[in-house]
Amino acid sequence: MAKKKINIILILVVLGLWGTVGYRSLYRQFSGDEVLLEKQNQTKNITISQINKDTFELEKINRDPFLNKQFQNTVVIRKHVSGFSSVKKIIPPVNKKVVTNIDWPTLVYYGYIASKERNEDLILLKIDSKLYKLKLNDPVNGLIVKKKYKDSIEVFFNSQIKIIKSK
């Protein structure tokens, strides 16, 4: 019973709203002349007001607001001779490191064998046609395997590092 009363009230409110919207739109269409005269009178009374710009001068800030430090004022004097200034910079020569060619043995990486019991993985590496099973950081013929990845290993030999990819 309560729902029925609420529905009737809501329907009456919606019909009232749509009725006022329809009445206003139809009233403006058929009354016509008075509205046009009002619009014409409004366009004659328009005055354009000009806005003057406010100008002011910004001063240089002597304090950094974020770091709370004072800036030092330094005066830079530049001498211009015939339109340009010439400043010679002395650049010290860069000493390049001498790269020595180290003969690496022939390396072929075949992968690794994972051990579940011990946390030590055996790396299968062929050095000069000999197959070795190596652990990380074990030296063999001057070679040390530093890191192991899924598809490659990082090998240290005579102070050089090289990455060997699997076949």
Image (cartoon, rainbow, N blue to C red):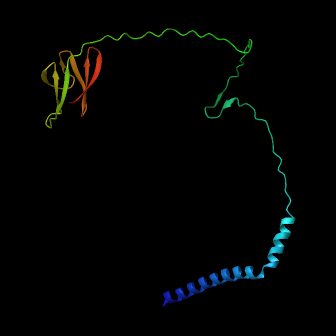
Q: Is residue 10 visible?
A: yes
Q: Residue at x 86, y 70 (%)?
A: 41
Provide residue 131's location: percent of width, then percent of height: 12, 23
Q: Nearer the viewer, residue 87 or 129?
A: 129
What's the residue at 61%, 32% (across, down)?
Answer: 67
In the rendered structure, the answer to whether residue 155 lies left or right of residue 92 reads: left
In the drawing, does residue 148 fall left or right of residue 42? left
Is 80 or 52 nearer to us in this picture?
A: 80
Q: Would you identify the image quadrant in which residue 82 lies?
A: top right
On the image, the x and y values in percent for residue 27 come to 73, 82
Q: Is residue 29 above or below residue 146?
A: below
Instruction: Please state which of residues 125 and 13 is positioned toward the viewer in this rendering.
Output: 125
Return the residue nearer the eye: 83 or 92: 83
Above or below 20: residue 96:
above
Asked whether residue 120 is in view, the answer is no
Q: Residue at x 75, y 32 (%)?
A: 59
Task: Give the quadrant of the C terminus.
Answer: top left
Q: Position of residue 36 (x, y in %)?
A: 81, 74
